[in-house]
Amino acid sequence: MSTRQPNSKYCFICGMENPVGLHLHFEETAPGEVTADCVVAEKYQGYPGIVHGGIVAAMLDEISGRALMGDGLHPRFMYTARLNIRYRKHVPVGELLHLVGKVKKDRGRSATAYAAISDKDGNVLAEGESLLVDVPADVYRDVDLEEFGWKVYTEEESA
């Protein structure tokens, strides 16, 4: 059984109110494992028909961090300290992509995670490993998560 993680208002990857964002939804499929499915529009291409490498990197960055986020009710926010990416094949625009993020090691204030983007046939197109560091609690202690738009959006709100 999977649990949908919250989205925000303006994050480029998950922000539901970001007019140029990707609007991805993330599902926690197991402890320390998150997935998302998406079709990237042509406006995010680099070369014709191919998703820009920076967009690929942003998707890998987001899904790796979300693997450590937990249930979303008491989110664990983390900074990416390092992201190593291996671009295996071109990532196509306009086709179904499957993203997965998995916790590799959790060391308390820092962690490592694996992320991958695959095509509909399961071929890994890009993958990465990230080093993540906890955002200090005082940085977001006074942040109103509701104002931030941090919630699980319904299908109607996502449209």
Image (cartoon, grey):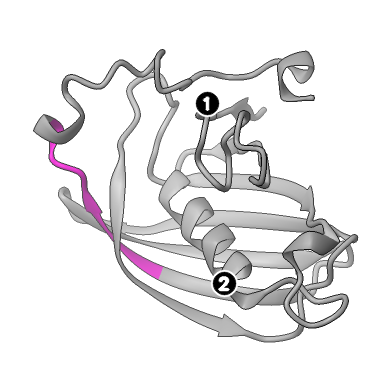
Kindly identify the residue that appears in the image at 66 percent across and 56 percent down.
Answer: 99
Q: Residue at x 41, y 23 (%)?
A: 148
> Which range of residues does the magenta coloring cover?
130-137
- Percent of width and height locating residue 21: 64, 45
Residue 61 falls within the magenta-colored stretch: no
Tell me the residue that label 1 is attached to. 6
Residue 103: quadrant of the picture? bottom left
In the displayed structure, 60 sits above or below 27; it is below
User: Residue 55: which quarter of the image?
Assistant: bottom right
Is 99 placed left or right of 149 in the picture?
right
Q: Which mark is residue 54?
A: 2
Asked if residue 54 is positioned above or below residue 30 in the image, the reply reads below
Helix or strand or loop: what does disc 2 sit on? helix
Q: Amino acid at mark 2?
A: Gly
- Secondary structure under tag 1 reads loop
Q: Quadrant of the C terminus?
A: top right
Type of amino acid at the residue the image marks with label 1 = Pro
Q: Name the spot of residue 69 as percent of width and height, x first.
A: 39, 38
Where the N terminus falls, by quadrant?
top right
Mark sitting earlier along the chain (2/1): 1
| Secondary structure mainly formed by the magenta segment | strand
Q: Is residue 143 left or right of residue 30?
A: left
As measured in the structure, the alpha-carbon distance from the residue carrying label 2 to the one carrying label 1 is 24 Å
Lateral position of residue 43 relative to residue 133, left or right:
right
Question: Crowding near pointer 1: few (<14 within 10 Å), some, many (20+)?
Answer: some
159 sits left or right of 143 in the view: right
- Placement of 29 over or under 96, stated as above or below: above
Q: Nearer the viewer, residue 77 or 16?
A: 16
Q: Which is more toward the observer, 18 or 57?
A: 18
